[in-house]
Structure formats: structure tokens, C-alpha cells
Amino acid sequence: MAKLLKKFSPYLIGIILGILSFIPFTRQTTIASFLTGFGSNTVSQWNYFLDYGSESQNMWQRSYVSLLGLLPSASPEVIYLSASVDDNGDGLLGNCEYTLNGVVPNARYWSYAIYGNDNYYLQDPNNLKSDPTYEDLFAQVTNGYEIITNIGETYEIKIGNNLVKQDGTLSHFGNDFNLILRIYGPDLQYYDDPSSIPVAKILKESCK
């Protein structure tokens, strides 16, 4: 038995190390942020990603992007920002309601998307589809044109359990979640000075 264990222990160790090195890249973790650099830069509580599609990415960055597949476009076409906590530093919870208060960015187009902690779009549990279409998923995106389009003006977005019938809202359907702000065709000044990117405040309104 000892001889057999000695023979196969390198394979077992390799499998364990492989699993341990893979798991951190299945979501936004401290280890993944350290190795990739993604999520290490912030404006308020929003992590920003300026070079997600860069050809100069290292192997960790390429692996992370290919596994998650959430933010595929390259700079300077788009800037992505991700938030997983509110203004108090608390996680975004499915039993709470929130309000986003922000300023319209200087860009061609902008939108918010809401993801579960498994990095998938959240779907209406009363209308689940095994093979959702782009339109089904796009229903969980709040577009700038649904709210206001004038650069520099303020906007407000409500986040709650089920607001799918209302424009300018996002629904978490009772799931803990993350938010993604996508700024397409952004002012190039944002790349020179990321702190100038107008990020929204995330205010917790009430919890059940």
C-alpha cells in the first residue's frame, strides 16, 4: 500500500495544486487580483479595468479573462468598473434594496449590468430559461438612454428584488450580486486620470 501511495502521490499532489490554483480565478478574489492586476485599482469602491483586452496581458490575466468571459472588449473602446460593496463597505445583498446615484459619463454609450456571485447574469426565477437568448439577458441591463443622456447630469437607478418591468432599474431576485458599469467610447481623459471617472454612489435603502 505504501509503495502504491508513493507511486501515485506526485499525481495526487499535482491534481490538488491544479485545483487550488484554478479556484481563485473562477471569481474576483484577492489572489486573482494580485496575480492579474485586475481589480487592484479603484475609484471609491469601484474596481476599474483599463486594459482588459490588451495584447500585453500575462498568462494569469489571459486565463482569468478566458474563464470569466465577462468583459471581452479592449481599451480604448470601453472601460469596465465593478463593485461588490455599497458605500458602507458592506457586500451587495439579495435581501436589501439599493439606489445608485451617479453622473452621466462623457462617453458614446454607457450601461449597468448585474451579476450573481457566480459571475452569471441573474435571471427572473419565475421565467427561467435553460438557454436564454441575448434579449433575455439584455433585460437585466440598464442602459443610459433609459435614464438620461446629457453628459454631466445626475441619474438615479433603483435596485430591488424584482423590478424587471420598470426602465432604469436592476433586479437581483433575492441573490447577492455584483455590479458592472460599462462605459463605451469613453473620454480618453479617463485613461490619463482614472480618478476622474464618474462612479455612482451605492446607497443601501432597506433590508428584510
Image (cartoon, rainbow, N blue to C red):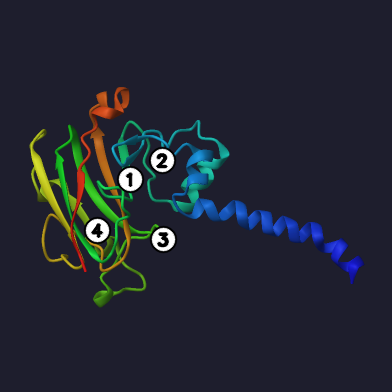
Which quadrant: the C terminus? bottom left
Does label 1 or label 3 sit earlier along the sequence?
1
Q: Position of residue 157 (x, y in %)?
A: 14, 52
The residue mark sitting in front, 2 or 4, is 2
Which quadrant: the N terminus? bottom right
Q: Residues within 10 Å of mark 4 (few under 14, many from 20)?
A: few
Q: Position of residue 43 (x, y in %)?
A: 30, 35
* Disc 2 to disc 4: CB gap under 8 Å: no
Does label 2 or label 1 sit earlier along the sequence?
2
Position of 201 relative to 106 (above/below): below
The residue indicated by pointer 1 is: 82
Q: CA distance from mark 3 to mark 2?
A: 17 Å
Does label 2 or label 4 sit earlier along the sequence?
2
* Residue type at numbered disc 1: Ser
The residue shown at (54%, 39%) is 35
Q: CA distance from mark 2 to mark 1?
A: 8 Å
Q: Position of residue 131 (x, y in %)?
A: 36, 70
Q: Residues within 10 Å of mark 3 (few under 14, many from 20)?
A: some
Q: Residues within 10 Å of mark 2 (few under 14, many from 20)?
A: some
Q: Residue furthest bottom?
A: 126
Which quarter of the figure has residue 133? bottom left
The residue indicated by pointer 4 is: 138
Q: Is residue 168 left or right of residue 174?
A: left
* Residue type at numbered disc 3: Asp
Does label 1 or label 4 sit earlier along the sequence?
1
Disc 3 is placed on an element classified as loop
The residue indicated by pointer 2 is: 39
Q: CA distance from mark 4 to mark 3?
A: 18 Å
* Disc 2 to disc 1: CB gap under 8 Å: yes
Q: Residues within 10 Å of mark 1 (few under 14, many from 20)?
A: many
* Residue type at numbered disc 2: Gly
Q: CA distance from mark 1 to mark 3?
A: 14 Å
